[in-house]
Image (tube, grey):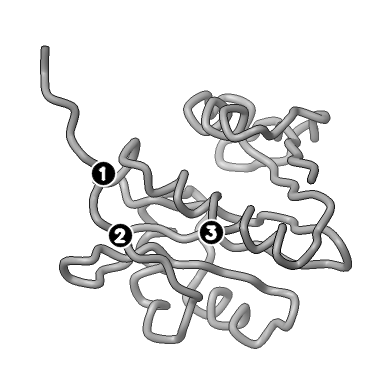
Amino acid sequence: MDEISKPPSIMISPMHSEHLDDLAQLERLAFSRPWSYDALAEELQNPLAVFFVAQSAEDEQAVGYIGMHHILDEGAIANIVVHPDYLRGGVATALITEAVDYAKENELYRLTLEVRASNLPAIALYEGMGFKREGIRPGFYDSPKEDAAIYSLYF
């Protein structure tokens, strides 16, 4: 049996301006319609934005991030991105856990997110962390056109 590789040693911190170049690159690697550097930079000025960055403890390179908006008593997760070399290594789980901890500390009653209906690995992760499917947004995504599955986690 093959030895299971350990997840990379990562640190998670709030997003800062020094992360923007790395995060814009992660967006380009992960999405057909990525957020731009400028769009990410705007989130630094948005009082509703709560973004956390996962960095390699070795070289402090950003290997993933989660971005959400804290609106009244809800958290709307806008993006979860993990570098392709770090997929299935625990980075997304650590980022979602950070968002869940934030939600609990700030007395949010739920977190919501949308995911491509065909993104079975992400759906398995969300369901494994307690998110429940609440509906579909037909044709939500472009490039390619696809439905979004809506998931929520209630506290």
Q: Amino acid at mark 1?
A: Pro
Residue in front for this viewpoint, 129 or 42: 129
Q: For the residue carrying disc 1, how many other residues have a C-alpha within 10 Å: few (<14), some (14-19), or many (20+)?
A: few
| Left or right of residue 91, residue 113 in this image | right
Residue in front for this viewpoint, 29 or 22: 22
Residue 66: numbered disc = 3
Q: In x, y percent, where is residue 40? A: 54, 74
| Residue at position x 25%, y 72% in the image | 60
| Residue at position x 36%, y 53% in the image | 29
Quarter holding residue 25: bottom left
Secondary-structure class at tag 2 = strand
Quarter holding residue 98: bottom right
Precedes in sequence: disc 3 or disc 1 = 1
Q: In x, y percent, where is residue 33? A: 53, 54
**Residue placed under numbered mark 1 in the picture:** 7
**Residue placed under numbered mark 2 in the picture:** 10
Q: Amino acid at mark 3?
A: Ile
Q: Amino acid at mark 2?
A: Ile
Q: For the residue carrying disc 3, how many other residues have a C-alpha within 10 Å: few (<14), some (14-19), or many (20+)?
A: many
Q: Are marks 3 and 1 in contact (CB under 8 Å)?
A: no
Q: Are marks 2 and 3 in contact (CB under 8 Å)?
A: no
Residue in front for this viewpoint, 77 or 22: 77
Q: Are marks 1 and 2 in contact (CB under 8 Å)?
A: yes
Up/down of 73 relative to 121, above or below:
below
Farthest residue, direction top: 1
Precedes in sequence: disc 2 or disc 3 = 2
